[in-house]
Amino acid sequence: MTKNTYTINKKILFNYKECHLYSISSNTRESLGSNPSWLLLFLIKNNGNAVSLEEISAYFLEKGRVVNSTTAIQYISKIRKALKALGEHTTVIATIKGGGYYIPGYIDISVSPPLCIDSIVKEKVVATDLSADVLAIDTESNVVNLPREKNMSLLKLLLLVPFIIFCVTLVWLLLPTPFDHVKYRKIQIINGCTIYADHDMPEKGSKIEKLIFNEKDISCKNKPYVYLTYFEYSDNYSLFLCNAPIDDKSVKNICSSILRLSND
C-alpha cells in the first residue's frame, strides 16, 4: 500500500500526491501546488533536522526543477498560510538563522493510510441531492412541494374521483325503475278493466289506444288491472296485466309478463 498521506498534530492531513492540506474537524482543504507540497514532504522526511536553502535548491534540482532561495521562501510562506487557514496556529515550520527551515520535535507527524478526500465531498453531495429529491422547497414562495412522482399520483387521484362519481350517477340514471316503485294513477275503468298509467294516456285514435280499448287483444276476465308504462326514449308502452292492485310485496306473483306496444 502506498502511503501518501501524513497527519500533522492529529488534525491536518497532508496528501503530497494530491498536493493539498485537509482539516479533519472542518472538512475543508487548502491547495498547495506541486512544488510547495514537495518542499513540505522534504521537511517531514528530514525528521526535525534543519535544511538550508541550498539543500532545498539541490533537492528540487535532483527532480529536474529549478528553485532558488527566493522561491523557496515563498513556498514556505504559502504552506504556513494554508496551515493557519485550516486552524493550525502552532508553528509547524520553524526558521533557522542563516537561512533554513525545520519541523520542531513537538509537532506530531505520523503516516496515515491513503485517504481520498474527494470521496468524502462526493458523499455529501449525493446526500444533499437525495434530500432535495425527497423534499423540494420553494424558497421564494415558502411552499413545500412533494416529488414529481407523488405530484402526478395526487393529480391522477383528483381526476379519478370526479370520474367515478360521474359513472355511478350515470348508471343510477340509466337503471330502470322497478315496476313496483313506479307511481301510477288510475285513469279509467273500461269493460271491467281498471287502467292505471304513469304517464298521459296514448293519443286518441293512436294504434296503442286502439289496441287497448277497441281491439280484443287484452282480456280483463282473469286480470282486471292494467298498468300502462310509457318509455319516452323509445316512444313505446308496456302493459302489465295483474289480478290485483300491485304493491311492494305482491307484484311478482299477481302480474303477467309484459306486453310491449309500439306506435309504429
Image: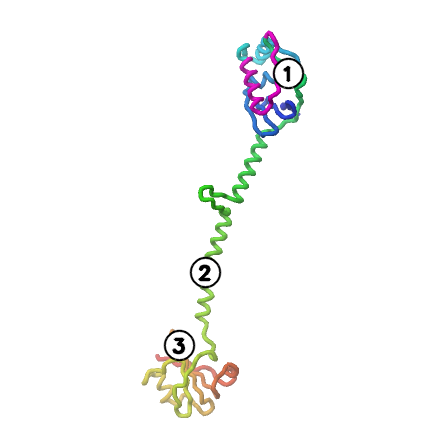
Q: Front-most of 255 and 51?
A: 51
The residue mark sitting in front, 3 or 2, is 2
* Residue 253 on image: x %, y %: 52, 84
The residue mark sitting in front, 1 or 3, is 1
Across the whole image, how many numbered discs are drawn on residues?
3
Query: Badge 1, how many Cα within 10 Å: few under 14, some, many 20+?
Result: many
* Labelled disc at residue 231: 3
- Look at label 3 and name its amino acid: Phe
* Labelled disc at residue 60: none
- Look at label 2 and name its amino acid: Pro
Task: Answer with mark 1 or mark 3, whichever residue precedes in sequence.
Answer: 1
Are dots 2 and 1 in contact, CB under 8 Å? no
Q: Name the residue under label 1.
A: 103
Task: Answer with mark 3 or mark 2, whichever residue precedes in sequence.
Answer: 2
- Look at label 1 and name its amino acid: Ile
* Res. 208 image quadrant: bottom left
Q: Mark 2 points at which residue?
A: 162
Is residue 78 located in the magenta-colored stretch of the structure? yes
The residue mark sitting in front, 2 or 1, is 1
As measured in the structure, the alpha-carbon distance from the residue carrying label 1 to the one carrying label 3 is 107 Å
Could you tell me which quadrant the C terminus lies in?
Answer: bottom left
As measured in the structure, the alpha-carbon distance from the residue carrying label 2 to the one carrying label 1 is 78 Å
As measured in the structure, the alpha-carbon distance from the residue carrying label 3 to the one carrying label 2 is 30 Å
From this view, report whether residue 188 is shown above or below residue 24.
below
* Res. 239 image quadrant: bottom left
Please give left or right for residue 80 compared with residue 199 in the image: right
Magenta segment: 72-98
Q: Judging from the image, what secondary structure is the residue with disc 2 in?
A: helix
